[in-house]
Amino acid sequence: MAIPILVMLPLLLISILKESWYPFFFKMARLWSKFILIGMGFAYSIKREQTPEAKKSYMFIANHTSMADIMLMLVSVKNPFVFVGKAELAKIPLFGFFYKRTCILVDRSSPKSRQAVFLRAQKRLKTGVSICIFPEGGVPEEHIDLDGFKDGAFRLAINHQISIVPLTFADNKKRFSYTFFSGSPGKMRVKIHKFISTEGLATNDTRMLNEKSRAVILNQLQTFQK
C-alpha cells in the first residue's frame, strides 16, 4: 500500500489541495489500486451489463466482505466517486492521511455523524462526482453471504434522483478476508448489474429500493456459488 503512495506523493498532495481537482486524485487512486491487486496476485475479471456514462453521477453499491473491496471498487468503476466509509480507517498510517481528506467519514455510533454524511454527500454530488457506499454498514460474519442493507444509500439516491449501480464481488472473502492468515492469490470476479432507476421515486419508496437492490446482489452471489 505504501510504495505507490510514496512514489506518487507529490502529485497526490497537489491533487487534494482543491476539491475541483478530485477527478485527478481519483485517477491516481485507480492506479494505486491496480498496483496493489496485481502485486498481491489477484487477477480481476469485470463483466458489465451496463456501463456508467461519463460526467454523470450514480450511487455505486456492493457487498462488503474483504479488505480488498476498496481497491476492487476503484478498478471496476471509471467514473470519479467518493467513498462513504468508516472513520476508523483514517488511523491507518499514510493511507489514512489521504482517506480522511478525500472520503466522507462516518462514525456509526454517532447519530450526528450519520446526519453529517448526508450533507457532505449532497455537496459532493453537486460537484458532479458519484458516491460509493457499502450498504451492509460493515463486514458481516464469515457465515453470512449478504447482511441486511441500511437505508442511507437509497434515501440519498432518491433525494438526488440518481441511479443505483449494484456491483457483486464474488471472490473477495475467499481471496483476502478480514480473518487473518486466510486467503490466496487468484481471480476476483466482479459483476456490474443493470442500473436501478430512482426516477419518480419518493422517500417512502426507500425500503422497496433497498430490497430490490439487495436481491440483485444476493441472487448473483448465489449464482457465483453454483
Image (cartoon, rainbow, N blue to C red):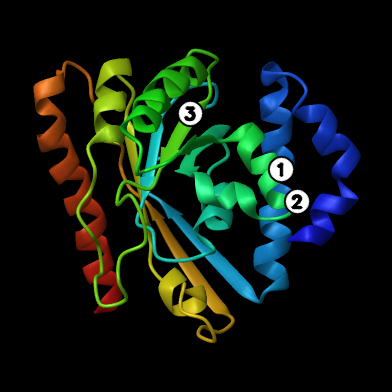
Cα–Cα gap, marks 2 and 1: 5 Å
> For this rendering, which residue is in front, 216 or 153?
153
The residue at which mark 1 appears reads as: 97
Query: Is the C-beta separation of discs 2 and 1 under 8 Å?
Result: yes
Where residue 129 appears, x then y in whole percent? 53, 24
Q: Is residue 16 left or right of residue 196?
A: right
Q: Earlier in the sequence, mark 1 or mark 3?
A: 1
Q: Amino acid at mark 1?
A: Phe
Viewer-side label of 1, 3: 1
Q: Dot 1, how many residues are within 10 Å of its Cα: few (below 14), some (14-19), or many (20+)?
A: few
Give the image quarter of residue 140.
bottom left
Cα–Cα gap, marks 3 and 2: 24 Å
> For this rendering, which residue is in front, 130 or 106?
106
Query: Is the C-beta separation of discs 3 and 2 under 8 Å?
Result: no
Where residue 32 appears, x then y in whole percent? 72, 52
Q: Please, is residue 48 above or below residue 84 in the view? A: below
Whether residue 205 is visible: yes
Where residue 27 appears, x then y in whole percent? 70, 38
Q: Is residue 70 left or right of residue 225?
A: right
Q: Which mark is residue 94?
A: 2
Where residue 42 appears, x then y in whole percent? 60, 72
Q: Which mark is residue 130?
A: 3
Q: Amino acid at mark 3?
A: Ser
**Quadrant holding the N terminus:** bottom right
**Quadrant holding the C terminus:** bottom left
